[in-house]
Amino acid sequence: MGLSTVLTVEEIGLRLLAAAFCGALLGLDREMRGKAAGLRTHTLISISCALTTLVALEFYVGLHASGDERPSDPVRVIQGVAQAVGFISAGVMFRSGDSVRGATTAAVIWVAGGLGIACGAGYYLLAGMALGLCLMVTILFTVLMDRFPQFGKEDEDGGRVDDRKARERRRAARPPGRVRRIARPASRG
């Protein structure tokens, strides 16, 4: 099999560049906010997803053109890429007590992978619409949350989460009969 059986080299290059552009825009937003995964990470994830999609499509067409009747499905490759990106996304999330950090960055990494798949398959309009929507959510919602802090995190009852409520929830979740003692220094005087 040669370099391309269906797509021209220019079309392959355009798809990879579109994926790099989408990933770079998402990564630039995260980089400017000082997040763990930034410009390079998002760009590389998007490019790798586009590359894998292109290889799967070319491989599929190449097998059918050669008369090979073995079952092959490029969607399975795309499914594997989506799972791999999910694994990478999970790596940037951290749980500390009742809070989870990195969930938005993980979600944006997942979107970068999806945009790479869309660009690799040639769905530029879909990728552009999803990119615009994702940037709107990450930028506009951040501005709104900074401007109106009362829209911050809420608990199940609709009230504001504070440290006191979080401590009460942790105490209530402890197994019964467990006594927690804290040593206190002796008073002088």
Image (cartoon, helix red, strand yellow):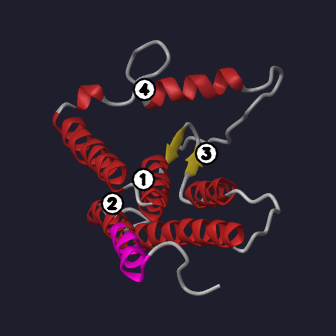
Residue 121: x and y in percent read: 47, 60
Using the numbered discs, state the Cα–Cα distance from disc 2 to disc 4 in whole angstroms.
30 Å
Answer with mark 1 or mark 3, whichever residue precedes in sequence: 1
Residue 97: x and y in percent read: 58, 41
The amino acid pointed to by label 4 is Val
Contact (CB < 8 A) between labels 1 and 3?
no
How would you rate the neighbour count of disc 3 (Cα within 10 Å): few for under 14, some for 14-19, many for 20 or more?
few
How would you rate the neighbour count of disc 4 (Cα within 10 Å): few for under 14, some for 14-19, many for 20 or more?
some
Secondary-structure class at tag 3: loop
Contact (CB < 8 A) between labels 2 and 1?
yes
**Picture quarter containing residue 123?**
bottom left
| Tag in front: 4 or 1 | 1
For mark 3, what is the residue? Answer: 185
For mark 1, what is the residue? Answer: 108
Answer with mark 4 or mark 1, whichever residue precedes in sequence: 1
| Tag in front: 3 or 4 | 4
